[in-house]
Amino acid sequence: MTNKGFTINERGQLNRFAIEPKIYVDETPRIGFTEYAEKLNGRLAMIGFISLIALEVFTGNGLIGWLTSF
Protein backbone atom coordinates (compact mmCIF):
# COMPACT_ATOMS: atom_id res chain seq x y z
CA MET A 1 0.00 0.00 0.00
CA THR A 2 1.50 3.31 -1.01
CA ASN A 3 0.62 6.60 0.56
CA LYS A 4 1.57 8.81 -2.34
CA GLY A 5 1.72 12.36 -1.04
CA PHE A 6 1.07 11.35 2.58
CA THR A 7 3.43 11.01 5.47
CA ILE A 8 3.05 9.66 8.97
CA ASN A 9 4.48 11.70 11.85
CA GLU A 10 6.27 10.36 14.93
CA ARG A 11 2.97 9.65 16.74
CA GLY A 12 1.64 7.52 13.87
CA GLN A 13 -0.83 10.16 12.65
CA LEU A 14 -1.44 10.56 8.95
CA ASN A 15 -0.35 13.94 7.61
CA ARG A 16 -2.19 14.62 4.36
CA PHE A 17 -0.75 18.12 3.96
CA ALA A 18 2.94 17.24 4.03
CA ILE A 19 3.66 18.00 0.38
CA GLU A 20 3.29 21.64 -0.56
CA PRO A 21 2.05 22.54 -4.04
CA LYS A 22 4.55 23.89 -6.53
CA ILE A 23 4.30 27.64 -7.00
CA TYR A 24 5.41 29.25 -10.22
CA VAL A 25 6.29 32.94 -10.36
CA ASP A 26 6.29 34.71 -13.71
CA GLU A 27 9.19 37.13 -13.51
CA THR A 28 9.16 38.32 -17.11
CA PRO A 29 9.23 42.10 -17.31
CA ARG A 30 6.07 43.78 -18.61
CA ILE A 31 7.66 47.10 -19.60
CA GLY A 32 10.05 48.09 -22.37
CA PHE A 33 10.66 46.19 -25.60
CA THR A 34 9.43 42.79 -24.52
CA GLU A 35 7.69 40.11 -26.54
CA TYR A 36 4.45 40.89 -24.69
CA ALA A 37 4.61 44.59 -25.60
CA GLU A 38 5.39 43.87 -29.24
CA LYS A 39 2.46 41.46 -29.54
CA LEU A 40 0.12 43.96 -27.90
CA ASN A 41 1.26 46.81 -30.18
CA GLY A 42 0.89 44.60 -33.25
CA ARG A 43 -2.62 43.56 -32.31
CA LEU A 44 -3.70 47.13 -31.63
CA ALA A 45 -2.21 48.25 -34.97
CA MET A 46 -4.16 45.52 -36.77
CA ILE A 47 -7.39 46.61 -35.08
CA GLY A 48 -6.74 50.24 -36.08
CA PHE A 49 -5.92 49.33 -39.67
CA ILE A 50 -9.07 47.22 -40.08
CA SER A 51 -11.13 50.01 -38.46
CA LEU A 52 -9.83 52.53 -41.01
CA ILE A 53 -10.65 50.18 -43.87
CA ALA A 54 -14.17 49.67 -42.47
CA LEU A 55 -14.60 53.46 -42.12
CA GLU A 56 -13.66 53.96 -45.76
CA VAL A 57 -15.98 51.19 -46.94
CA PHE A 58 -19.00 52.44 -44.98
CA THR A 59 -18.60 56.20 -45.55
CA GLY A 60 -16.97 56.29 -48.98
CA ASN A 61 -14.27 58.65 -47.67
CA GLY A 62 -10.92 58.06 -46.07
CA LEU A 63 -10.06 59.27 -42.59
CA ILE A 64 -9.16 62.84 -43.65
CA GLY A 65 -12.25 63.12 -45.88
CA TRP A 66 -14.47 61.82 -43.11
CA LEU A 67 -13.01 64.26 -40.55
CA THR A 68 -13.40 67.29 -42.88
CA SER A 69 -17.00 66.44 -43.82
CA PHE A 70 -18.38 67.80 -40.55
Image: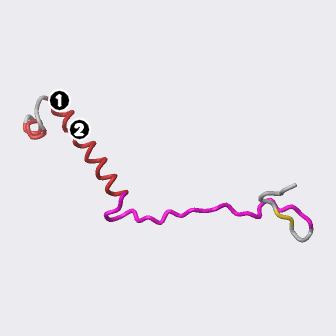
Span of residues in magenta = 12-35
| Image: 21 above or below 62 | below
At label 1, counting other C-alpha atoms closer than 10 Å, the crowd grade (few under 14, some 14-19, many 20 or more) is few
Residue ranking furthest to the bottom: 10
Q: Which mark is residue 57?
A: 1
Q: Which mark is residue 27?
A: none
Residue depicted at x 15% and y 29%: 59
Tell which of 24 and 3 is nearer to you: 3
Q: How many marks?
A: 2
Residue 62 position, x and y percent, is 11, 36
Distance between the alpha carbons at the discs numbered 1 and 2: 10 Å
Residue depicted at x 89% and y 71%: 10
Which callout, 1 or 2, points at the residue further toward the start of the chain?
Answer: 2
| Image: 45 above or below 19 | above
At label 2, counting other C-alpha atoms closer than 10 Å, the crowd grade (few under 14, some 14-19, many 20 or more) is few
Name the chief secondary structure element in magenta.
loop
Residue depicted at x 47% and y 66%: 27
Residue 26 position, x and y percent, is 50, 62
Left or right? Give the position of 59 relative to 45. Answer: left
Three-letter code for the amino acid on which mark 1 is drawn: Val
- Label 1 secondary element: helix
Residue 53 position, x and y percent, is 19, 35
Q: Which residue is mark 2?
A: 51
Left or right? Give the position of 14 relative to 65. Answer: right
Residue ranking furthest to the right: 11
Q: Is residue 32 magenta?
A: yes
Q: Is residue 26 magenta?
A: yes
Three-letter code for the amino acid on which mark 2 is drawn: Ser
Q: Quadrant of residue 22?
A: bottom right
Left or right? Give the position of 2 relative to 66. Answer: right
Tell which of 68 and 37 is nearer to you: 37
Q: Quadrant of residue 8?
A: bottom right
